[in-house]
């Protein structure tokens, strides 16, 4: 059996893992990244492309809790459970319901806001550093409320977000039409986030992070980790090809696949998988000028390089089942409600987001100490939080003081 000795091993080649690897390598550490899939080919590729400083609302809220039973039974709605997965998900759903109560939801919003506040500025600096500024768009992001009732509920939500420093402008239907002239007229209005950034091609962006990391000396190994065993002064990783790695420290940034490894250490994290979908329509990027979220349906229309990406919906149910035709049909119908002439998508995609009941990521040392550091569970905001998470990870690995306290994101909270 081949045995390798390494300094730092990062498990996961998504945007969080690669940003963390690059930061650690530049601090003088020798870093290896392990992932069986090409860098950035998972959720880091298939997202809506928003760098969303405004995305501080946890998935669970009192309003959603009231609607949860009907939402879970509606196969055509924005929040669903894959058929056959409900029984296995009941413990997670119980924790999710608890975290959706008013006090817990407010605490979760506060914790998320502490991470997102300067996301735009961090990304602009990071993009300039990796020669990716041309992929960053500064046109803001937009929520659309089709009905007046939805708009009034949105106003209350925006007031809460403003309390945590989010910059948002409420728009009447006429102002909304001026900002996005191709959208159909609505009764409600909009919420515009002028400070938000977006990415014209998330796959290309993560590719540039990977290239920068490799140029700095990071090695990327295309393999899976089948077992992780902490020892007194090191961590032993067994790879799918039989190779054994003895690492001084390990960072677990494997997104939806992180629970398998955390469980082996005894950190039993209630991590479930959100199955995320998108459709793309080639040649249709001019339909909207910036990412637009239709609030009632919970999906985004994002202009990207040469195409329009339609992304969203929440489906709980693991990583093994094939794509759900219902979820793809949901997206097709909803974008068809806005642009009826968009009938046939050029391609579709399914990826996996790591979902925790409180919508907070896990960013902390493990129960065995800083030999193992966690950086997963970012849900819908992994792209947004990658530079901040990398900064916190480097502090944890290097045993220096983090920029913000990490107690709210500690694995021991479960």
Image: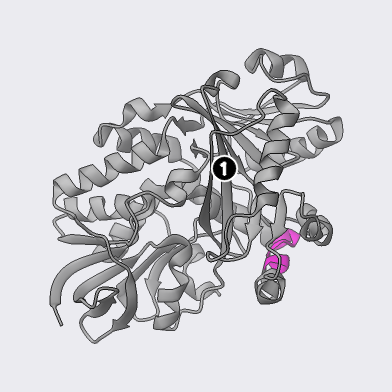
Name the residue at 34% across, 25% down: 134
Pick whichever, 35 or 7, lies toward us: 35
Label 1 crowd (10 A; few <14 / some 14-19 / many >=20): many
Drawn side of residue 185 relative to residue 28, left or right = right
Could you tell me how many numbered marks the image carries?
A: 1
Q: Nearer the viewer, residue 225 or 414?
A: 225
Q: Main secondary structure of the magenta part?
A: helix
In this view of the protein, which residue sits in the foreground, 81 or 332?
A: 332
- Side of 115 where 67 appears, left or right: right
Residue 379's quadrant in the figure?
bottom right
* Residue 281 visible here: yes
Q: Does the magenta-highlighted stretch encompass residue 101?
A: yes
Q: Residue 97, percent across and down?
A: 73, 66
378 in relation to 278, above or below: below
Q: Position of residue 390 (x, y in %)?
A: 34, 53
Toward the right, the furthest residue is: 149
The residue that appears at 33% across and 79% down in the rendered structure is 227
Vertical arrangement, residue 21 with respect to residue 334, above or below: below
Circle 1 residue: 278
Residue 123 is situated, as x and y percent measured from the top left of the image, at 38, 37
Q: In the image, what residue occupies the spot 18% across and 54% down?
A: 218
| Residue 339 within the magenta-colored segment of the rendering | no
Residue found at the far bottom of this picture: 232
Say if residue 401 shows up in the picture. no
Residue found at x 45% / y 66%? 257
Quadrant for the N terminus in the image: bottom left
Q: Nearer the viewer, residue 206 or 136?
A: 206
Left or right: residue 114 compared with residue 370: right
Image quadrant containing the C terminus: bottom right
Q: Give the percent coordinates (x, y) of residue 217.
A: 13, 52
Q: Specify start and end residues of the magenta stretch as a single range.
A: 96-103
Disc 1 secondary structure class: strand
């Amino acid at each position: 059996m081949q045995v390798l000795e390494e300094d730092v091993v990062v498990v996961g080649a998504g945007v969080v893992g690669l940003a963390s690897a690059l930061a650690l390598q530049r601090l003088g550490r020798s870093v290896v990244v392990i992932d069986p899939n090409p860098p950035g080919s998972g959720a880091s590729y298939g997202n809506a492309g928003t760098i969303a400083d405004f995305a501080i609302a946890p998935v669970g809220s009192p309003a959603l809790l009231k609607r949860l039973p009907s939402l879970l039974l509606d196969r055509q709605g924005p929040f669903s459970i894959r058929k056959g997965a409900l029984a296995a998900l009941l413990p997670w759903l119980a924790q999710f319901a608890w975290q959706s109560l008013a006090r817990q939801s407010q605490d979760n919003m506060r914790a998320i806001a502490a991470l997102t506040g300067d996301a735009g500025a961090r990304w602009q600096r990071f993009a300039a550093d990796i020669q990716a500024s041309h992929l960053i768009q500064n046109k803001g992001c937009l929520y659309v409320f089709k009905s007046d009732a939805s708009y009034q509920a949105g106003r209350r939500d925006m007031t809460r977000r403003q309390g945590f420093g989010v910059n948002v402008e409420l728009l009447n239907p006429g102002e909304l039409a001026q900002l996005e002239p191709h959208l159909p007229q609505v009764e409600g209005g909009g919420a515009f986030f002028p400070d938000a950034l977006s990415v014209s091609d998330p796959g290309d962006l993560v590719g540039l992070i990977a290239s920068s990391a490799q140029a700095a000396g990071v090695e990327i190994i295309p393999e899976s980790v089948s077992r992780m065993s902490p020892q007194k002064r090191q961590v032993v990783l067994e790879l799918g090809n039989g190779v054994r790695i003895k690492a001084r420290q390990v960072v677990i940034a494997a997104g939806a696949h992180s629970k398998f490894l955390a469980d082996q250490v005894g950190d039993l994290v209630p991590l479930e998988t959100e199955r995320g979908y998108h459709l793309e329509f080639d040649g249709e990027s001019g339909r909207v000028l910036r990412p637009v979220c239709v609030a009632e349906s919970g999906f985004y229309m994002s202009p990207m390089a040469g195409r329009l990406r339609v992304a969203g919906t929440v489906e709980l149910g693991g990583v093994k089942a094939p794509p759900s035709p219902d979820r793809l049909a949901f997206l097709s119908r909803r974008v068809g409600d806005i642009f009826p002439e968009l009938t046939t998508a050029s391609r579709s995609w399914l990826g996996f987001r790591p979902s925790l009941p409180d919508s907070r990521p896990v960013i902390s040392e493990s129960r065995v100490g800083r030999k193992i550091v966690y950086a997963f569970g970012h849900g819908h905001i992994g792209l947004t939080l990658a530079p901040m998470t990398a900064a916190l990870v480097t502090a944890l690995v290097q045993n220096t003081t983090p920029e913000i306290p990490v107690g709210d994101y500690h694995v021991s909270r479960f």
